[in-house]
Image: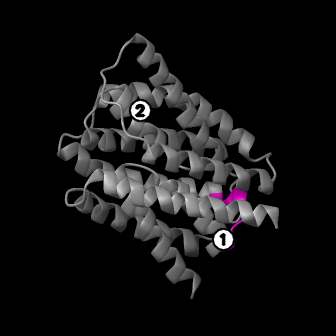
């Protein structure tokens, strides 16, 4: 199968996840770029950031139009992650490829477990607001280090900790991911390695189209079913990445 076909297929799957779930798709971008398309872990992290940023920016206006973005909550959540995203972006260039691969796998496992865990609908309190700030900082660090959007952290926090409805959490997470991804890209400027735009460009384009389909899919399929299916896919990907490191 050609690199172009692989890029288009992987991009469509990632876009579907981002559009339907507000996150999780970016976790798959780096493994797809590394194992299917031959990117180095460092180049995959930067290319993944570019793909996630383009996809979220293109998907956000529809959620804004539908009134599914909590601007104040999203801005505060994103603000907590900007500095960690910048610092982690600078640090990522100094990590060996094997360490990044293990980190990708660990994040995929965490994402899967968060998706499988039932959400907590209780309203926010002072302590929970502090938890939300911590989650925002952690989200920024993960975005900067690994080039993943981190919606798997944002959506459960926005629903379970800050009390947003699921659709509003999905739209707001896209705002948060966009801000953190732009900060991380600024930190990585000039250090992305060989991004192979002939692959990264089509990958991003397919993700954008997939995100539109994912938004429509979310209106027809229950959120729990989507999250569980994607969680099991992430666990399988994590196992393959760890097996590759051990070999």
In this image, 191 relative to 201: left or right?
right
Q: Which residues are magenta?
A: 37-44
Instruction: Name the residue tied to disc 2.
Output: 157
Q: Is residue 80 left or right of residue 16?
A: right
The residue nearer to you, when weighing 200 against 102, is 102
- The structure residue drawn at horizontal position 77% and vertical position 50%, both measured from the top left corner, is 99
Up/down of 14 relative to 79, above or below: below
Q: Position of residue 66 (x, y in %)?
A: 17, 45
Q: Is residue 189 visible?
A: no
Q: Which residue is at a point 41% across and 24% down the rendered structure image?
A: 76
- Nearer the viewer's eye, disc 2 or disc 1? 2
Q: Residues within 10 Å of mark 2 (few under 14, many from 20)?
A: many
Determine which residue is flagged by label 1. Answer: 35
- Above or below for 143 versus 48: above
Q: Is residue 233 magenta?
A: no
Task: Identify the residue shown where x is 69% and y is 73%.
Answer: 38
Residue 64 in the image, given as x and y percentages of width and height: 23, 43
Where 77 sits versus 139, above or below? above
Residue 195 screen position, x and y as percent? 64, 65
Image quadrant holding the C terminus, namely: bottom right
Q: Earlier in the sequence, mark 2 or mark 1?
A: 1
Circles 2, 1 touching at the beta carbon (< 8 Å): no
Distance, label 2 to label 1, CA atoms, is 31 Å
Q: In the displayed structure, would residue 159 be above or below residue 39? A: above
Q: Badge 1, how many Cα within 10 Å: few under 14, some, many 20+?
A: some
Q: Position of residue 69 (x, y in %)?
A: 27, 37
Residue in front for this viewpoint, 244 or 87: 244
């Amino acid at each position: 199968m050609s690199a172009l076909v692989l890029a288009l297929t992987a991009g469509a799957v990632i876009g579907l996840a981002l559009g339907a779930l507000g996150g999780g798709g970016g976790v798959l971008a780096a493994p797809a770029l590394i194992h299917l398309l031959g990117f180095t872990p460092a180049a995959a992290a930067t290319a993944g950031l570019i793909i996630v940023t383009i996809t979220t920016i293109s998907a956000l206006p529809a959620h804004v139009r539908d009134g599914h973005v909590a601007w104040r909550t999203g801005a505060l959540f994103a603000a907590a992650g900007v500095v960690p995203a910048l610092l982690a972006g600078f640090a990522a260039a100094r990590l060996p490829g094997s360490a990044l691969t293990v980190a990708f796998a660990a994040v995929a496992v965490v994402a899967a477990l968060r998706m499988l865990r039932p959400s907590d609908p209780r309203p926010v309190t002072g302590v929970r607001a502090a938890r939300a700030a911590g989650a925002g900082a952690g989200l920024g660090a993960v975005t900067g280090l690994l080039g993943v959007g981190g919606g798997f952290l944002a959506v459960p926090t926005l629903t379970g900790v800050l009390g947003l409805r699921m659709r509003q959490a999905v739209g707001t997470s896209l705002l948060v991911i966009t801000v953190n991804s732009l900060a991380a890209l600024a930190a990585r400027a000039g250090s992305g390695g060989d991004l192979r735009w002939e692959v990264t460009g089509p990958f991003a384009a397919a993700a954008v189209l997939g995100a539109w389909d994912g938004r429509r899919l979310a209106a027809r399929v229950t959120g729990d079913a989507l999250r569980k299916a994607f969680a099991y896919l992430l666990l399988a990907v994590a196992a393959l990445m760890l097996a590759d490191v051990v070999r």
